[in-house]
Image (cartoon, coloured by chain):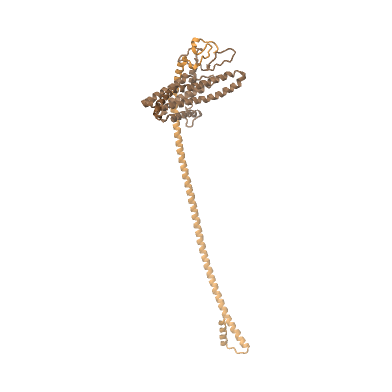
Chain colours: A brown, B orange
Amino acid sequence: MAEPASDGGLSFHPMDQFIIKPLFGAAGDKVAWYTVTNLTLWMALAVVCVLGLFVLATRRRAIVPSRGQSVAELFYGFVYKMVEDVTGKDAVRYFPYIFTIFLFIFFANFLALIPMSFSPTSHIAVTAVLGFGVFFAVTILGFVKNGASFLGLFWVSSAPLVLRPILAVIEVISYFVRPVSHSIRLAGNIMAGHAVLKVFAGFAAVTAVAPVAVLGVVAIYGLEVLVSAIQAYVFTILTCVYLKDALHPSH
Amino acid sequence: MAEPIEQELAGECVNSIGNAIGMPQLCDAWFGNQIFWLIVTLVVIYLVLTKIALPRISAVLAERSGTISNDLAAAEDLKRQAVEAEAAYEKALADARSEAQRISEEARASIKSDLDAAIARADEKIAAKSAESEKQIAEIRAGAMTSVAEVARDVAGEIVKALGGKADASAVNAAVDARVKGN
């Protein structure tokens, strides 16, 4: 996708923003699993945001909340209600895990909108860990809670008997596709948005189309703000839906 | 990024001038780093939430809903008191009104009885006066009758004398009495 730089011509490197670089040391140093990289920095900033909003802003434990505390309570109430409504009242014990996922994706998405920043959630490795983590957690939880009757999830008892084997095959396939779509949806949205932003920004260097390109950047940026929040929401609500299948596998 | 970097160190994902080769997302040399730091981040966020943030926020929310329900109960109580006070006020007002009515009724009754007594007394006096006057009138009338008889007798005697007769007093009297009674 990225063309090698050619002298004199227009050169786009929309994917360069996704390169993982060591924070310390020379560019091009080897990136080991423990290396502190730009990814580490922006994930750490997400943690800092969580700390700021949920520890610093709530430190006064005010009955009449300050602005920061009400935002924290708003997040809490939003996700708590989502878990309660989608998954059920018995699922609120899994709320901290779901809230962790939501806050990480939310802050990673929004921090990535800062110019010159790095977007961890655009990386398929990151979202795949999240998506497959949810998949394995939900599957193991389903078998632990329901035993073999968890397999009833694939046996659609409300369908005619002849259709049930066919439906079971489809259900099994869709079940195993879940983590793939779950993770690619998030990474794809974020990566595409940021790449498009970069392409528009590249066109802004050409005087003739610069106004259009700048307007395009503004429009796509607005879209990306929506996408950041919506993808965090979608990932979380799908996690709730999958968790519901594990807790109540009957159709 | 412009200066050349060593190809072997950068791996197969970045070219000699630092541009990405293909999608950096698919560069498996970086997967370990990404997964490691993601897990670290998630664990840190999870610990921050479960150790500090969530207990704090849920405590604040519980406390707030408790405070709100207490305040609502207090407001309910105050409202009930206000209703009671209003009822008491209405009752006092009604009592005062009926009291005033009773007092004015009493005053009216006593005035009426006084008036009746005065009227009765006045009627009595008037009746006595008119009876007395009637008696006097009767006396005067009786007096006048006797005077008329006397004058008639005298006049009759004189007329008889003037006519040259001899006035027999007893005959004249009888004649006059007969005449006067005839009237």
User: Residue B30: horizontal and vertical position, in percent?
Assistant: 47, 15
State the quadrant of the N terminus of chain B: top right
Judging depth in this view, the residue of B97 and A86 nearest the camera is A86
Residue B175: image quadrant is bottom right
Residue placed furthest toward the front: A162
Image point 61% across, 20% down: which residue? A209
User: Residue B74: horizontal and vertical position, in percent?
Assistant: 45, 39
Judging depth in this view, the residue of A238 and A120 nearest the camera is A238
User: Residue A46: horizontal and vertical position, in percent?
Assistant: 49, 22
In the image, residue A67 sits, relative to residue A26, either above or below, namely: below
Judging depth in this view, the residue of A8 and B115 nearest the camera is A8
Q: Is residue B171 visible?
A: yes
Image point 53% across, 69% down: which residue? B127
Judging depth in this view, the residue of A57 and A70 nearest the camera is A70
Residue B179: image quadrant is bottom right
State the quadrant of the C terminus of chain B: bottom right
Q: Is residue A46 visible?
A: no
In the image, residue A249 sits, relative to residue B82, either above or below, namely: above
Question: How many labels, in total?
Answer: 0
Image point 52% across, 70% down: which residue? B128
User: Residue A162: horizontal and vertical position, in percent?
Assistant: 39, 27
Image point 49% across, 23% down: which residue? A107
Residue placed furthest toward the left: A147
Horizontal side of B174 relative to B45 (left or right) equals: right
In the image, residue A94 sits, relative to residue B122, either above or below, namely: above
